[in-house]
Amino acid sequence: MKGIPGIKEFPSDDQYWRVDWFGAIQPNPKVAREPALQVIITPFKTPDIKILTPNKLASASSSLVDYNEQRTIQIGTGQLPMLCIGSIWRNNEFQPQLAGQVTEFSSLEISERTTRTLNASSKEQNQYIIPFSHYRFGKDGFFSKMVAIEHEGDPYGILVPMAELVRFYYAVSTDLADVVFSGDLKHNLHSVLNMEHTWSEPEDHREVIGLRQRFSDEDGWVLARIMNSPEAWAGATAVHDEMLKNRFNGKPSHIESAFPFSGLTNLTARCKLIPTKDPKIWRYLVLSLVRCTAAFPFRHLTVYRDNDNRTEEGKDKPDSEKKPGWAGPRVIQGNTDKDFQSQQAPNKNSAMEVFNLPTDRFGDIAGKEPDKPTKEQCEYKSVAVAKPPVPSDQLSSAQGDDTDSTTGSGRLNSTYERAKALPASFDTFIKAIEHLNTFEGFSAKIREPDELTRYIPLTKTEGCWQWSYLESRNMTRRQVLIGDIYYEGNWFSLVEFEHRENDKCRLGLAYKSNGVLVSNYLMNSALLCIAENKGIWNKVQTSLLDGLLIDSYKHVWPSATDLASSLSAKIKVLITKAKGLNS
């Protein structure tokens, strides 16, 4: 995937490998500061990329992988931000598809009453909660920890690996992973925050933090939550506490953590369905978390940095009166031709190579940016780098003081992916959906886009020339907009996607014969078929789409009113026809 470096420890054998679980945390004798995390991986039985087409649920299937060849590799914990259960790798490189069905859990309660901690190998009524027939996490994952969330009356209805809680909520960057696994929050907080410039302003629902220079502004949101939420503090510090306890007792240390909040949330996750003794009840094994809407304990964030050189114009003192500032390593955009590895610490004189990982994981801070107050005068001036950085041929996510290594320093940062503005061509579509609400008996709205429905799915590896791109040269994705329409107990979904000037594509109206709303997952499958047929709706084989029905309409309309009138008339005809067939 574009912008994500490789990991040297993955096999280079042309096979596709799936990350199936995380095992224990172990000291790395070759890299003192950064412990190693066991990663359980399994190869697919076939090299046929067709079964691994993006967003195919089958990629989470146990029948597609060869458990006899399952193995464990070890990577530095600083690489956790770019690795999740269900990710697929080939020749050290991350592939653009992830295993599991994207599932949305609405109004999910997280509390002491609804959650419990258990081993991955726990049993219920003498039966493994995760049956080996449906999912295998290997012997190294046997004693790993999970949190079970009550769902629909089942105390084990949703199962989340503890390692995934850490990856998603706490170790969102390489530097935050270092903080969590090193125990600096409890034992060296001064290296993380300047507490003289850290305080709360409850009357304004604001948190002010003195953020040390190595942390990004996005890291600031996570650190401020940890400092202001008892649940987040417990979840973030439990990781190192567990490591110390197990090291003292001579036991392998498996990650232990907790949700950083209590209360209600809408949680989106990639899941694998797990059976129970009751054939009517299925559980959700979370492979990776995607989005969480739980509230932060503050609304606004102010980031104060010791060496922030922004000042109010005309009030700053001349450079000749300032003290020399901190001369850190040169920071550059990461080179994806270099792999991360975990056998050698970085040279402290190498450049800092930064990789930005776009995310939209925390709904409560979507679109928000921290405030950065200016100072009337700055006490420090920038210090020029006296010599060029040491060249490197590979990367390490560890901290280090090595001066002989040829390994560079790599950092993964979580950056908020702000929504791209909708194209002007969608304007008539949006107004037509809104106008339908003025028609008697109709209710309509624009569907909130997610990762399954925001863009036309790719049909080839990212970067390859393909119809799914509006512009292949710069890999601009075709945006999608869906309007959901309800009339007389039936749902209809109108679909529009971005067009090139010479495209002759139409709008699609998707619906089910039983009137239920077309799910995001089924819609994604339909969009994939559209991509494979280069935008032509009547070429889509609906028999492959769980009985989905599709009609198409011309794309250009004189006005939104005309489009809305045509849609209402068409929907009434479809419902009348359906009643005739059922009578």
Image (cartoon, grey):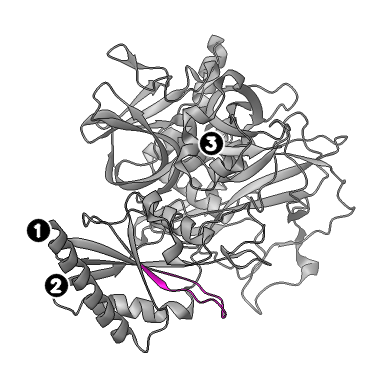
Image quarter of residue 358: bottom right
Q: CA distance from mark 3 to mark 1?
A: 68 Å
The disc label shown at residue 441, or none: 2
Q: Nearer the viewer, residue 160 or 515?
A: 515
Give the mark toward the camera: 3 or 2: 2
Q: Nearer the viewer, residue 285 or 276?
A: 276
Q: Main secondary structure of the magenta part?
A: loop
Q: Tag 1's secondary structure? A: loop
Mark 2 touching mark 1, by CB under 8 A? no
Label 1, on which residue? 583
Label 3, on which residue? 185
Amino acid at pointer 2 = Gly
First-in-chain label (3 vs 1): 3
Q: Is residue 496 visible?
A: yes
Image quarter of residue 100: top left
Callout 1 crowding tier (Cα within 10 Å): few <14, some 14–19, many ≥20: few
Task: Identify the magenta region.
Answer: 496-508
Amino acid at pointer 3 = Leu
